[in-house]
Image (cartoon, helix red, strand yellow):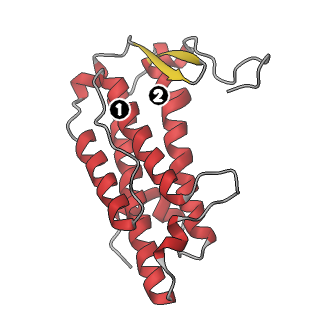
Amino acid sequence: MAPSGRRPYLHPTPQAWSIALSVSLYEISIPTYRRGLQNLSSFLDKAAAHATTQGVDLSTYAEARLAPDMHPFTRQVQIASDAAKGGAARLAGIEAPPMPDTETTFPQLKERIAKTIAFLDTITKQQVDSRQAATIELPLPGRTMTFTAPDFLMQFSLANFLFHVTTAYALLRSHGVPLGKMDFLAGGQMAPA
């Protein structure tokens, strides 16, 4: 959000590309959320293996922050989960399952990711693609942002989701976990090293 008195960074008016979308909303959204969560789960596996070999307590990674005013690793995973399930639910016009943010351990975070993926797997192409012309309202503290479905996905939801997956990656990487670009791009599809 822009500081008070300035124009917002996001433009909730329809963009030209959103009117003539040639790839379906479902194809852009659900597989992207799913892949990112699978990769995030694989980051946790690599971090656990690294902690074991290096004699590091996993809580060191769970509590890690990039900066004092940023959320710790556990919260980054929770927000990535929320972004995926919330984005998918809004696109499909359904309610997202509640998930209290109580995870503190890697097994609990992996379980949350698995539950989020299971929810994504219940959403059909028809549910999302039939809402191409839907208006999506996103309540925020102090205001509500209104988008077309394509603009919500492309201007807000995917960027928010990828921000938190990227931040989780960077936190682990900054603590020496041997993650590389291919872990971010296809970690959930690669065989463990």
- Circle 2: residue type: Leu
Depth check: give the residue in front, 181 or 54. 54
- Nearest to the eye among marks 2 and 1: give it: 1
* C-alpha span from label 2 to label 1: 9 Å
**Residue 193 place in picture, x, y as percent:** 39, 79
Q: Give the structural element (helix, strand or loop) at label 1.
A: helix
In this rendering, is residue 66 above or below 80?
below
- In percent of width and height, residue 51 lies at 47, 81
Q: Give me the residue at 69% from left, 24% from top.
A: 9
Asked if residue 90 lies left or right of residue 76, the reply is left
Q: Earlier in the sequence, mark 2 or mark 1?
A: 1
Which residue appears at 38% of the width and 27% of the height? 23
Q: Name the quadrant containing residue 177.
A: bottom right
The three-letter code of the residue at mark 1 reads Ala
Q: Pick the quarter of the image with the N terminus.
A: top right
Q: Residue at coordinates 25% horizontally, 41% vertically from top-left?
A: 119
Query: x, y (%) of residue 94?
Result: 27, 24
Q: Position of residue 171 (x, y in %)?
A: 59, 63
Q: Tell me the tag on residue 88.
A: 1
Residue identifier under label 2: 153
Q: Looking at the image, can residue 179 be seen?
A: no
Q: Which label belongs to residue 24? A: none
